[in-house]
């Protein structure tokens, strides 16, 4: 599990953690049944309060993303993952809407925006 806290991001650290773990789950980087990094170890790696990690894991457990297993720790939930996978568009929807609105406001055509998206997509591969 790879998590990076961005000090420039105005959102709370626990929210950054939740978002990054959710993205890894829907991307298939974290698989159902896979054990998450322990609270203590992740707190040391990220240099943040263990209660922040614990809060993140508790929220994700309550939302059904994670399961607590006695003697193992937190794992990616095995049940209900298909429903959450269908929601993966939600991670980019608002950014896409903003991109389209901004592009229209400054006079980009649909084909110009699509060309830019394709260019950046290829650069990331």
Image: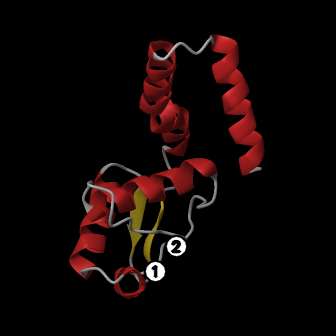
Q: Residue at x 64, y 12 (%)?
A: 110
Crowding at label 2, few (<14), some or many (≥20) Cα neighbours within 10 Å? some
* Tag 2 near tag 1, CB within 8 Å: yes
- Tag 1 secondary structure: loop
Q: Nearer the viewer, residue 45 or 69?
A: 45
Q: Residue at x 38, y 65 (%)?
A: 6
Say whether residue 123 is left or right of residue 60. right
Residue 117 in the image: above or below residue 111: below
| Callout count | 2
Whole-percent x and y of residue 61?
Answer: 34, 58
Say whether residue 75 is left or right of residue 64. right
Whole-percent x and y of residue 121?
Answer: 71, 40
- Tag 2 secondary structure: loop
Residue farthest along the front direction in this orientation: 106
Residue tagged 2:
35
The color scheme shown is: secondary structure
Q: Residue at x 52, y 73 (%)?
A: 35
On residue 112, the disc is: none
The residues tagged by marks 2 and 1 sit, at their Cα atoms, a distance apart of 7 Å
Residue 77 in the image: above or below residue 91: below
Residue 76 in the image: above or below residue 2: above
Q: Going from the N terminus, do you reach mark 2 or mark 1 first?
A: 2
Give the quarter of the figure containing the N terminus.
Answer: bottom right
Give the number of the mark in front: 2 or 1. 2
Q: Residue at x 49, y 26 (%)?
A: 99
Report whether residue 83 is seen: no
Whole-percent x and y of residue 95?
Answer: 46, 32
Residue tagged 1:
72
Q: Nearer the viewer, residue 16 or 59?
A: 16
Whole-percent x and y of residue 118?
Answer: 73, 32
> In the figure, residue 39 lies in which quadrant?
bottom left
């Amino acid at each position: 599990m790879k998590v990076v806290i961005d000090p420039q991001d105005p959102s709370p650290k626990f929210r950054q953690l939740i978002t990054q773990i959710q993205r890894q789950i829907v991307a298939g980087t974290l698989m159902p049944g896979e054990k998450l990094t322990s609270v203590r170890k992740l707190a040391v790696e990220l240099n943040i309060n263990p209660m922040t990690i614990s809060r993140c894991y508790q929220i994700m457990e309550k939302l059904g993303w994670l399961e607590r297993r006695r003697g193992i720790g937190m794992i990616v939930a095995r049940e209900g993952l298909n429903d959450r996978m269908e929601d993966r568009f939600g991670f980019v929807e608002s950014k896409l809407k903003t991109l389209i609105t901004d592009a229209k406001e400054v006079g980009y055509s649909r084909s110009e925006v699509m060309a830019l998206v394709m260019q950046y997509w290829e650069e990331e591969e």
